[in-house]
Amino acid sequence: MLFLLLPLLAALFPGGDRFEEPVSYHFLQTSAFHNHSWVHLSSGWLGELQIHRWNSSSDAIIYLYPWSRGNFSNRELVDLERFLRVNSIGIQGFHTDNFMSEDPFDLQVATGCELHSGKGFLGFKQVAIQGYDFLSYHNKTWLPSPKGGEEAQKVCKLLSQNQDYTQRMHRLLSDTCPRFTLGLLDAGKAHLQRQVKPEAWLSSGPSPGPGRLLLVCHVSGFYPKPVWVMWMRGEQEQLGTQRGDILPNADGTWYLQATLDVAAGEAAGLACRVKHSSLGGQDLLLHWGAPPSALGWILSAVIVALALLAGLGFWFRKRW
C-alpha cells in the first residue's frame, strides 16, 4: 500500500528540488517526574518545522497552521489523539513499574517516520531516560540500547511479549504516519514551497587580536533553509570563512552569520556573497566598507539604544 502513495510525493514535489530536507514527521514527547508530580510536553514536526503542539490539560492536539490537519478526517484525528493520550498514561505506568525510586525522572520519546530513497517510509521510535539512549523500535522489533543495561533488556522483552501494543505501533509507523505525512505535504504545499528572499548586512565583531578585524556577514529572513554564504575576494572564496548554525526566526524563516578573521589592512576588497533559491540566480554581494543599508542603520541604532538603556540602568542601580 505504501508504494502506491509515493507517486503522490513525486507529484507534490516534482524533481525533488523544492523539498530538500528529509521528508519526515516525528512527534516528540518529554515527560518529567519531579517532586512527586508529572509534566508532559509534546510537539509534532514536519522536517524541522513545528506544526503541532499537545495541550496536556485538554488532551488534544493544537494545530499551529491551518493546513496542519493534513487530509485526515476528524475521526482519524480523534483516534490519533487517543493514542497519544494513552501513550502519556503508559509512560507514567512505565515509570511506576520500572523506576519508582527515581525522582527526578526524565524521559524523552521520538516517534515518527522518514522517507528513504528506494526504501519508502521507515518508521522509528526512540526512547531516552535521564538523557541516555534506552531502547528503540524498528520493523516490529524492540531493541535495547547498550547504555540501557539489563533494565532496557527487560523492558524490551516485556514489550515484545505485548503483541497487541507492538502491532498497533507497527500500524502507526508503517501506515498511519506515512499517510499523515503525505497528507501534510499536500495540504501545506503552498506554505512549504514558498520562497522568501534574505536580507543581508555586514558588521564587525569583537577584535580577534591586535591589528585584526572580525568581519561578520548577517543573512536573515530566508526560506527555505538551504543557503550558501561565503566571504570573497573577487571570485576567490576565502577558506577562513566560519559559518554559524542556521537558526530559526520567530516567523519560520532562518538566520545565519558567516565570519572572517583578517588583518585590518587586508579587509579592503573583501565582500560577502549570498546564494539562495529565492534570488533566481541573482546573488547578493555586499562589499566591506560600502555604506550600510537602511536595515544596517536601523540595527546599529537599536544596538546603540539598548547599550544606552543598559548604561542608564546600571547608573540608577549604582545611584540608589
Image (spheres, rainbow, N blue to C red):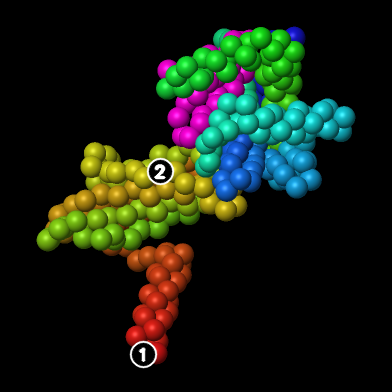
Magenta stretch in the rendered image: 123-146
Numbered disc 1: secondary structure: helix
Quadrant for residue 94, please give it.
top right
- Please, what is the three-letter code of the amino acid marked with disc 2? Asp
Where in the figure is residue 22, as x and y percent of width and height? 55, 26
Residues at marks 2 and 1, CA–CA distance in whole angstroms: 41 Å
At label 2, counting other C-alpha atoms closer than 10 Å, the crowd grade (few under 14, some 14-19, many 20 or more) is: few
Q: Is residue 8 visible?
A: no
- Please, what is the three-letter code of the amino acid marked with disc 1? Arg
* Residue at the extreme front: 101
Whether residue 218 is in magenta: the answer is no
Where in the figure is residue 129, as x and y percent of width and height? 51, 31
Where in the figure is residue 278, as x and y percent of width and height? 54, 42
51 displayed left or right of 151: right
Given residues 49 and 152, the one toward you in this image is 152
Label annotation for residue 245: 2
Against 278, residue 10 (above or below) is: above
34 displayed left or right of 4: left
Q: Residue at x 44, y 67 (%)?
A: 299
Where in the figure is residue 169, as x and y percent of width and height? 69, 18
Against 285, residue 92 (above or below) is: above
- Sequence-earlier tag: 2 or 1: 2
Given residues 5 and 308, the one toward you in this image is 308
Numbered disc 2: secondary structure: loop
In the rendered image, which residue does mark 1 sit on? Answer: 319
